[in-house]
Every structure is written in structure tokens, then in C-alpha cells.
């Protein structure tokens, strides 16, 4: 049974099968979360991104995780370089991440609040879209056992927890 966790923390410290980078479609690891992944994970991640990119907005690509404790990084392209995320690009890219997780038989996955930093997407709407896509994914066969939403600050964590409680009312204690 898949468990959805809402936690406050640093995504780059999670020892999971894959962490999910809030990426641009050129797969350039610049600022924000992508910059933290590049700094902590090392140059190998960007080198691998350069081989995969660019990808279409709404798609995703998987690389190794370099020096990070995770095994992989899935780069969720919810915007173009210098652009903004949209509801459609966030929904499509979240779905693309979940499809890659299945393709690579991953059991554990950790997302951030994709698109809410540099890409300017509203946090509440992000929580609604991403959790809804995970809930839809639950309806089918999945190799995922744990999906984490790792949020940088308490305010964002509280918003995700509220949406989670509304969307998964029968699942207690998963924050």
C-alpha cells in the first residue's frame, strides 16, 4: 500500500530511490532547489542532464544522484528556462515523474513543492495538483510504496498537510 508523507525538511538529504528536482526544460541546474542539488550532488548530475536535455515542458528525465543519498534525481520540467509554471505543465510533469518511477521500478520518491519558487506557481494550487496526481496514480498498479512531499518551510508544509487531509481523509498520521 502506497503511503503519502508530508514532511518539512531538506529534500537533498533524503535517502530514497529518487528525489524530484523542480527543473526547467533545458535541464540546467541553476538556482533554487536545482542549484542545491547541483552543489550537494556534484557536477556529474549536470553532465548527465546535458545528455538528456532539453526535454518538453511537462516531461521529466532521470539521472543518477551523484553525491546525494538518493539513488536518482528525476528532473520535473514544469517550466521553460526563465519561464513560469502553469497548472497544465505542473500536472503533466507530475504525471511524467510518476511514469518514470514506474518504468524504473522505484519504490520511494520524494517531491518538493514544484514550481512554487522561481517559477512563481501558487502553493495551494501546487499542493492540490500534485496530490491529486499521486491519488490518481494510487488507483492503478504501482511499485511505489512511499511518496514524500518534503517542504522547505512550515507554511508550505501546513498547506500541503491541509490538502492531504482533505484528499486522503482515511489516512491518519502521515505527516
Image (tube, grey):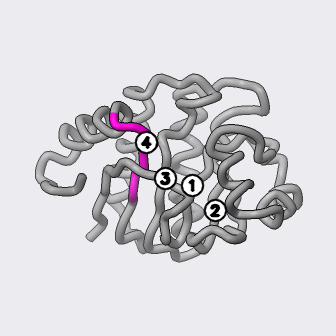
The residue at the point 47 percent across, 58 percent down is: 110
**Dot placed on the residue nearer the N-terminal end, 1 or 3:** 3
| Residue 151 magenta-highlighted | yes
Mark closer to the chain start, 4 or 2: 2
Q: State the SS at label 4.
A: helix
Residue at image position (68%, 71%) is 67
| Distance between the alpha carbons at the discs numbered 2 and 1 | 6 Å
Left or right placement of residue 172 versus residue 110 in this view? left
How far across and how far down the image is residue 59, in percent? 67, 47
Asked if disc 2 and disc 1 are in contact, CB closer than 8 Å, the reply is yes
Q: Which of marks 4 and 2 is in front?
A: 2
Picture coordinates of residue 169 (x, y %)?
Answer: 14, 46
Instruction: Name the residue rendered at 27%, 36% in the picture.
Output: 163
> Does label 3 or label 2 sit earlier along the sequence?
3
What residue would you read off at disc 3?
A: 10
Q: Residue at x 52, y 49 (%)?
A: 95
Q: Nearer the viewer, mark 4 or mark 1?
A: 1
Is residue 109 positioned above or below 93 on the image?
A: below
Question: Who is closer to the viewer here, 123 or 30?
Answer: 30
- Residue closer to the observer: 37 or 135: 37
Q: What stretch is highlighted in magenta?
A: 148-154
Real-space Cα separation, disc 4 to disc 1, in angstroms: 12 Å
Please tell me whether mark 2 sits on a helix, a strand or a loop: strand
Q: Name the residue that disc number 1 marks.
A: 20
Dot 4 or dot 1: first in sequence order is 1
Pointer 2 residue: 73
Vertical placement of residue 52 versus 57, above or below: below
Task: Identify the residue under disc 4.
Answer: 130
Amino acid at each position: 500500500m502506497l503511503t503519502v508523507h508530508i514532511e518539512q525538511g531538506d529534500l537533498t538529504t533524503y535517502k530514497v530511490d529518487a528525489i524530484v528536482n523542480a527543473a526547467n526544460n533545458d535541464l540546467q541546474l541553476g538556482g533554487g532547489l536545482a542549484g542545491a542539488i547541483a552543489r550537494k550532488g556534484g557536477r556529474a548530475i549536470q553532465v548527465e542532464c546535458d545528455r538528456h536535455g532539453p526535454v518538453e515542458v511537462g516531461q521529466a528525465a532521470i539521472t543518477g544522484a551523484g553525491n546525494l543519498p538518493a539513488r536518482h534525481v528525476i528532473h520535473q520540467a514544469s517550466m521553460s528556462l526563465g519561464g513560469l509554471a502553469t497548472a497544465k505543465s505542473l500536472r503533466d510533469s507530475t504525471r511524467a515523474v510518476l511514469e518514470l518511477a514506474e518504468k524504473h521500478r522505484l519504490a520511494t520518491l520524494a517531491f518538493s513543492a514544484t514550481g512554487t519558487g522561481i517559477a512563481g506557481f501558487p502553493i495551494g494550487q501546487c499542493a492540490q495538483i500534485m496530490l491529486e496526481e499521486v491519488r490518481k496514480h494510487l488507483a492503478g498498479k504501482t511499485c511505489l510504496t512511499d511518496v514524500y512531499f518534503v517542504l522547505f518551510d512550515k507554511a508550505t508544509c501546513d498547506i500541503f498537510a491541509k490538502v492531504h487531509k482533505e484528499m486522503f481523509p482515511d489516512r491518519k498520521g502521515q505527516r
